[in-house]
Image (tube, helix red, strand yellow):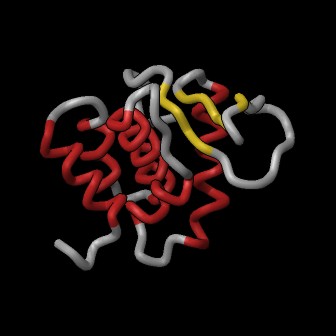
Amino acid sequence: MPDQPAPRRELERVRDGGGPGADHARTALTATATPDRLRAAILALAAARGPESSTCPSDAARAVADDWRPLLPDARELARELAKLGAVRLTQRGRTLDPGGTWTGPIRIRIVRPDVRSDP
């Protein structure tokens, strides 16, 4: 559907393809709680893109809500939590960020462990 944001269409393709991230994509598209949807979207998009590519917190926010900007801080914090669990790696300008550290500016999310469940 052309009027949907590209990240949402990507989630649908991941879900329908049944490959890496399909279960997380399903959760991202159907869960009722926004944090669950965001967490699952981060994992689905990162897993589908693979360890050699990355996604952005805004992609996850765009995938789950039309009004995505207010969700961006939550998406960044969920990415931080997933990095602390070892599921993803956060980078900035190609350098790995300490998930417990202080950082600002744009970040990228790379999958490390695609088997991590989306529930906390």
Residue 87 spot, x, y in % from top left: 52, 25
**Image point 38% across, 61% down: which residue?**
63
41 to the left or right of 86 = left
**Image point 21% across, 75% down: which residue?**
2
Against 78, residue 5 (above or below) is below
Residue 4 spot, x, y in % from top left: 28, 73
Q: Kindly give the residue lying farthest to the right in the view shown.
A: 102
Residue 42 spot, x, y in % from top left: 46, 44
**Image point 34% across, 69% down: which residue?**
5
**Image point 43% across, 38% down: which residue?**
46
Instruction: Count up the numbered dots.
Output: 0
Displayed quadrant of residue 70:
bottom right
Q: Identify which residue, 34 or 59, lies in the foreground.
A: 59
85 to the left or right of 13 = right
69 to the left or right of 64 = right
Task: Name the image quarter holding the N terminus.
Answer: bottom left
